[in-house]
């Protein structure tokens, strides 16, 4: 658990982060979103002390980060930045091994960990371990950047616009990979982005920042249905708000008893995709079933649509 | 093209070795350049030992310049040393502004004749290229790379040794190469203050109006410069290729 308490950063007359307090639960993804210059990167960088707060403190599992020597603190916290910052003079394996080497792991353990991570990111160790970063595509470099941050098995991962430089298709894949890895290791992730779509896709909770202040810190659904007045409302209140809301709920949340004709939909599909299927099939209702099971429930257009507006 | 250069340098090396080891075998070649039965081949000392002394003073002076200039370059690129940048700049600029001949003139009354004033002149003259290259090499390390290094918990010393210097190395080496080549030529004037070196051959040629001596001294220095330049360029390329700059095609 990370507790951020009254964190403030001032440089001269400018306030970059103004009295921010929030709690990030262990094993969740928290996305900090806001326009550029809102202070979100500064907030993130105060967690691993790349920036020293003017006042306030950060507790990780109850321990004040100021009590831990800064290099040791950073060995324990994974850090991924936009443009990944891979070392151009080190191979992929050398890059991933950075923190384990700083920690003095033995060669065998380092090699095993590097191979494990390369496998995890679908990069064949035999092909990629000895390549230099400049010989990789942007997506591959990004994966190596995340693998490097995870090398020493950190329980906390900080990501600053990690997917900003990727094209939309590779970005979607990178986001899916991140969710899979987060599920697998239970890593706590704090991710900064200016992309609302990304925030709603990844975040268990979303923190909205503007002008150095934390305006709202809530679940995606709460943010959509009960946005704080002003900036947050304008930020989430675009025409696709109902669709975002639909993409947060699953078919199982909206299904009704009784069979229906047609190709069955899996209960774990989100409602936005389910609605697409209904529109495409030209049907008003479709059966809901796992794989080849017999359908005992169905999903209807009106049932889906009722989830696309705030509860009355 | 690459091979032509390598073969050319190989031939020059062979020619140079034959000439400084057995200069007399070239006597027929140089005789037409002499008048009044003057000796066609330099005869006031061994060419081999002059060449070695010449190289020794160039290498030692450039090594000393490199240590100071790289050290200063590192110092002024640290946050705490930034204020020394103007001072360091003027220091190394003085070395370049004073012509080596003037430095010799000033140094001789202070340290006497011989190798010492030459060493001082070459040392000062070699500082600027190395310092400026160290500076540009260290400042062109990408910010995002340094940020990543800091974020992973590398101490300032480790960042310098494991990231900044390896990335700046090719540029620093280029500075050292330039200084070495400049000093190889400049060292000839050291012979005016009695430093042992290939300048002796040239000065002897000037004094006795012997075109053959002049040419021999000049040619040996020129060939040394070409060879040293080739060798140091190869080291630079090696360092650059360690940065992943080889020709493997980019994956898609």
Image: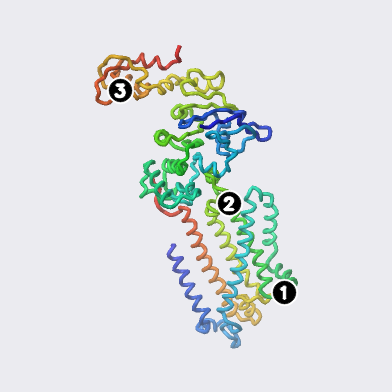
Instruction: Answer whether residue A172 is visible to the viewer in this image.
Output: no
Circle 2 residue: B157
Please provide percent x and percent y for residue A14. 66, 32
Q: Is residue A89 above or below residue B26?
A: above
Q: State the quadrant of the C terminus of chain A.
A: top left
Q: Is residue B128 above or below residue B154?
A: below
Residue under the image location 43 percent in, 28 percent down: A201
Residue under the image location 67 percent in, 77 percent down: B194
Structural crowding at the residue carrying mark 1, measured as other residues with C-alpha within 10 Å and reported as few (<14), some (14–19) or many (≥20): few
A299 displayed left or right of B225:
left
Q: Is residue B46 above or below residue B117?
A: below
Instruction: Answer whether residue B154 is visible to the viewer in this image.
Output: yes
Quadrant housing residue B61: bottom right
Please provide percent x and percent y for residue A215. 56, 24
Circle 1 residue: B112
Mark 1 to mark 2 CA distance (whole Å): 41 Å
Q: Secondary structure at mark 1?
A: loop
Residues indicated by labels 1 and 2 sit on the same polypeptide chain: yes
């Amino acid at each position: 658990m990370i507790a951020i308490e009254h964190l403030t950063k001032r440089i001269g007359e400018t306030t970059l982060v103004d009295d921010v307090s929030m709690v990030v639960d262990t094993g969740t993804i928290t996305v900090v979103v806001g326009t550029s210059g809102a202070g979100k990167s500064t907030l993130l960088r105060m967690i691993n002390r790349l920036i020293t707060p003017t006042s306030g403190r950060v507790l990780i599992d109850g321990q004040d980060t100021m009590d831990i020597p800064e290099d040791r603190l950073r060995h324990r916290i994974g850090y991924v930045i936009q443009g990944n910052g891979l070392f151009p003079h080190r191979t992929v394996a050398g890059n991933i091994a950075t923190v384990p080497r700083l920690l003095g792991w033995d060669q065998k353990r380092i090699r095993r960990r590097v191979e494990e991570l390369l496998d995890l990111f679908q990069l064949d160790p035999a092909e990629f371990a000895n390549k230099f970063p400049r010989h990789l595509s942007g997506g591959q470099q990004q994966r190596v950047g995340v693998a490097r941050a995870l090398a020493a098995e950190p329980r906390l991962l900080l990501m600053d616009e990690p997917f900003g430089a990727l094209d939309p298709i590779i970005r979607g894949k990178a986001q899916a990979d991140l969710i899979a890895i987060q599920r697998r290791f239970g890593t706590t992730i704090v991710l900064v982005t200016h992309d609302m779509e990304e925030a709603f896709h990844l975040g268990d909770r979303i923190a909205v920042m503007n002008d150095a202040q934390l305006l709202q810190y809530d679940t995606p659904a709460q943010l959509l249905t009960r946005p704080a007045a002003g900036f947050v409302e304008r930020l989430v209140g675009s025409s696709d708000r109902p669709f975002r809301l639909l993409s947060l709920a699953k078919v199982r949340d909206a299904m009704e008893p009784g069979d229906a004709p047609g190709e069955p939909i899996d209960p774990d599909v989100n409602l936005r995709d389910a609605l697409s299927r209904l529109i495409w099939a030209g049907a008003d209702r479709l059966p809901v079933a796992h794989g080849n099971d017999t359908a005992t429930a169905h999903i209807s257009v009106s049932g889906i649509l009722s989830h696309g507006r705030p509860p009355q | 093209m690459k091979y032509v250069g390598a073969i050319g340098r190989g031939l020059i090396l062979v020619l140079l070795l034959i000439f400084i080891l057995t200069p007399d075998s070239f006597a027929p070649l140089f005789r037409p350049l002499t008048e009044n039965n003057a000796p066609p081949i330099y005869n006031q000392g061994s060419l081999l030992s002059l060449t070695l002394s010449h190289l020794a003073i160039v290498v030692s002076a450039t090594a000393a310049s490199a240590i100071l200039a790289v050290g200063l370059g590192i110092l002024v690129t640290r946050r705490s040393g930034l204020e020394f940048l103007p001072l360091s700049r003027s220091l190394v600029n003085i070395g370049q502004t004073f012509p080596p001949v003037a430095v010799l003139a000033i140094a001789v009354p202070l340290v006497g004749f011989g190798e010492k004033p030459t060493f001082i002149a070459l040392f000062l003259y070699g500082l600027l290229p190395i310092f400026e290259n160290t500076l540009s090499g260290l400042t062109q390390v990408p910010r995002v790379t340094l940020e990543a290094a800091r974020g992973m918990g590398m101490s300032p010393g480790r960042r310098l040794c494991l990231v900044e210097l390896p990335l700046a190395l090719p540029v620093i080496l280029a500075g050292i190469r330039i200084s070495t080549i400049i000093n190889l030529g400049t060292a000839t004037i050291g012979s005016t203050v009695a430093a042992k070196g290939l300048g002796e051959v040239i000065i002897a040629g000037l004094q006795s109006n012997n075109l053959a001596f002049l040419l021999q001294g000049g040619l040996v220095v020129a060939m040394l410069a070409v060879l040293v330049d080739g060798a140091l360029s190869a080291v630079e390329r090696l360092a650059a290729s360690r940065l992943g700059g080889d020709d493997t095609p980019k994956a898609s």
